Amino acid sequence: MSEIFERCREAADYIRTQFDAQGAIGLILGSGLGELGDEIEDAKVVNYADIPNFPRTTVPGHAGQLVCGKLNGAKVLCMKGRFHFYEGHDMKTVAMPVRVMKLLGVRALIVTNAAGGVNRTFKPGTLMFIDDFINYMGDNPLYGPNAEEFGPRFPDMTKAIDPEYNALGKECAQELGIEVRSGVYMSFRGPNFETPAEIRFAETIGADAVGMSTVPEILAARHCGLRLIGISCITNMAAGITGEELTHEEVQETADRVKGQFKQLIREIVSRM
């Protein structure tokens, strides 16, 4: 039995004593987007600090709670806040909640983040469906001995973002009259915002948005066979595009401004997955 499987099993065993997440849709909410977790009905809440092997989140806008209940009639398991590589966690810990969700019987996953816009046709407040991704973090949660209990040694990433669910999400947005875009998300190590030179590099190799999360969770989800949708909220244009300095407060302010549309979209998607 692999070490990471044992760590995940211990966490899952504890969570099962608090609630049943079998058949739920998993939600991982990024910076400034955690308010959706407050709208879950019949909610049962577990603090990350109480879950074996779960670290605590330290980033503003990440509450550090696991919430299970109903959202627009659908059973959901929601992470209000995530773990980041830049907080000092190893990659297996960053991706651990996804594997725990798999053990709990979660059937699909929606991953969200706040991101910087690289595509110059974007503007702050744009919602972008992730069609593909670039891992520029210098590490990978699948590195090291393979956890055979979760998946194969060499998982294919051609359809890491589930095309059917992605199409469903875009259809929901169109029906709701919410303008969305699609693109490639590129993850950096952080915690500093990227330099203008790095953004020019990202633009050159085909990135539409940049951030410091999400890719580890996508890799782990694909490895263990969880279908997923990824959505970025473009909270600011990336370094060097407008010439303005970047702050985390700006990220949270923009996320707060578009949270109505964001919540409406997620509620519609989960009801139809």
Image: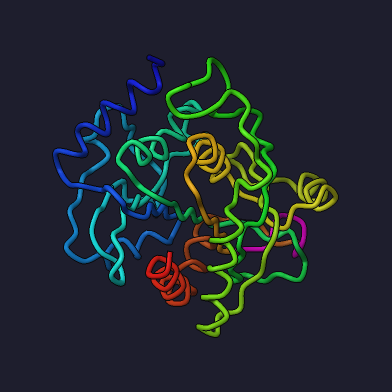
Question: As drawn, which residue projects farthest toward the right?
Answer: 204
In the image, taking residue 233 as reference, residue 83 lies left or right, namely left
Task: Give residue 76's position: percent from left, percent from top.
Answer: 31, 57
Which image quarter holds the C terminus? Answer: bottom left
Q: Quadrant of the N terminus?
A: top left
Asked whether 71 or 227 is in front, the reply is: 227
Q: Which corner quadrant of the image does residue 127 belong to?
A: bottom right
Q: Residue at x 58, y 62 (%)?
A: 166
Q: Nearer the viewer, residue 59 or 178?
A: 178
Using the image as rendered, state which of residue 99 and residue 235 is in the foreground: 99
Q: What residue appears at the point 62 percent right and 57 percent down from the top-left corner?
A: 130
Q: Is residue 159 above or below residue 124?
A: above
- Residue 125, relative to residue 98: is it above or below? below
Quarter holding residue 135: top right
**Magenta-colored span:** 234-242
Q: Nearer the viewer, residue 268 or 206?
A: 268
- What's the image's color scheme? rainbow
Q: Determine the residue positioned at 31% across, 51% down.
A: 23
Residue that protrudes farthest toward the left in the picture? 17
Q: Position of residue 186 (x, y in %)?
A: 68, 47
Count the numbered circles shown.
0
Q: Please state the horizontal and vertical placement of residue 57, each as a whole percent of the image.
A: 36, 40
Say whether residue 79 is left or right of residue 141.
left
| Residue 240 locus on image (x, y percent) | 77, 56
**Residue 19 within the segment the image draws in magenta:** no
Q: Is residue 42 left or right of residue 133?
A: left
At a point 56% along the width and 17% down the height, the residue shown is 144
